[in-house]
Image: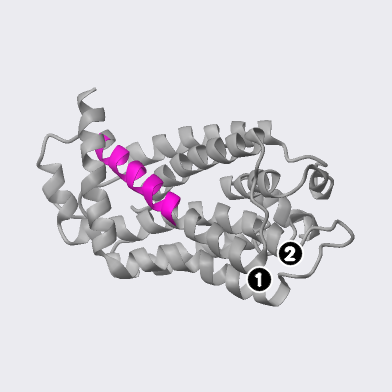
Amino acid sequence: MSALRMGLGRIGIELKQFFRDRESAVFNFLLPMILLVIFGSVFGGQELGDSGITFAQYFVAGMIASGILYTSFQNLAISIPMEREDGTLKRLQGTPMPRSAYFIGKIGMVFVAYIAQVTILIAVGVIFYGIDLPTTSVAIFTFIWVSVLGLIAWTLLGIAYSVVPRQGKGAAALVSPVVLVLQFTSGVFFVFSDLPQWMQTFASLFPLKWLTQAMRSVFLPDTAAAMEVAGSFELGMTAVVLVIWIGIGAVLATVFFRWTPRGAN
């Protein structure tokens, strides 16, 4: 309970640090919106076959799923190495705060940032591209639990991956390619069923594919399930995969997270 209280208290500090880094905060908020505007302007009015579903409606689900990836994994995998390099983490190591409290603080910060990001993204989609919002209680509940599980999983994975960059200034170069590969193979920029089989198989190993698919169940009509590879949105499997990745992320973050740079005393 002490670790939980310390973690909850840490959330406010993490939020202050996040918003003080204006460049990083603006990038996290604007990138999904910019991509939505670009793709929406080019393809937004086009329909996917004879489904009656516009590309913009299909694409917004992928961008919200990507927003989870940006806000948690990408943000933390880049910012934590910087905190490690400038000595912030070493100073925290000297306090009674355990790793779990630090992790809770990061998760809480990510949740708040995600809510702000999704609000902006949905507002742009509704105002400029006529995106239909979910109205049923089932769809809203699905959106909530998918977001929660996805944020926790990707936050823990971002903390774990933050040990890969040796220096803060080189972190983006090691993180951005991972994000792009996952996006291109997970049905964010293209209809997932149109991708080559090997890409589908590869993407199915990671959370983003399942997040994107589950978000389509929220923003697309039930008839759109026929467009999926399995003929359904597989929400049960999505929950199982995300819970498994939460467990994997927790183990990896606990084992590999470092307060100090590799090789430092």
Q: Which residue is mark 2?
A: 55
- Residue 66 got which mark? none
Callout 2 touching callout 1 (CB < 8 Å): yes
- Measured as percent of width and height from the top left, residue 247 is found at 47, 32
- Measured as percent of width and height from the top left, residue 237 is found at 67, 33
Give neighbour class at mark 1: few <14, some 14-19, many 20+ (Cα, 10 Å): many
Quarter-wise, where is residue 218 in the image? top right
Along the viewing direction, whichever of 175 and 67 lies nearer the viewer = 67
Task: Look at 49% across and 51% down and name the residue there.
Answer: 68
Q: Secondary structure at mark 1?
A: helix
Task: Look at 23% across and 63% down and name the residue there.
Answer: 20
Give the alpha-carbon distance from disc 2 to disc 1, as whole Å: 7 Å
The span shown in magenta is 101-116
Give neighbour class at mark 2: few <14, some 14-19, many 20+ (Cα, 10 Å): many
Quarter-wise, where is residue 62 in the image? bottom right
Figure check: 192 above or below 26:
above
Q: Residue furthest top?
A: 1
| In this rendering, position of residue 14 left or right of residue 253 | left
Q: Amino acid at mark 2?
A: Phe
- Give the main secondary structure, helix, strand or loop, of the magenta stretch: helix
Q: Amino acid at mark 1?
A: Gly
| In this rendering, position of residue 95 left or right of residue 115 | left
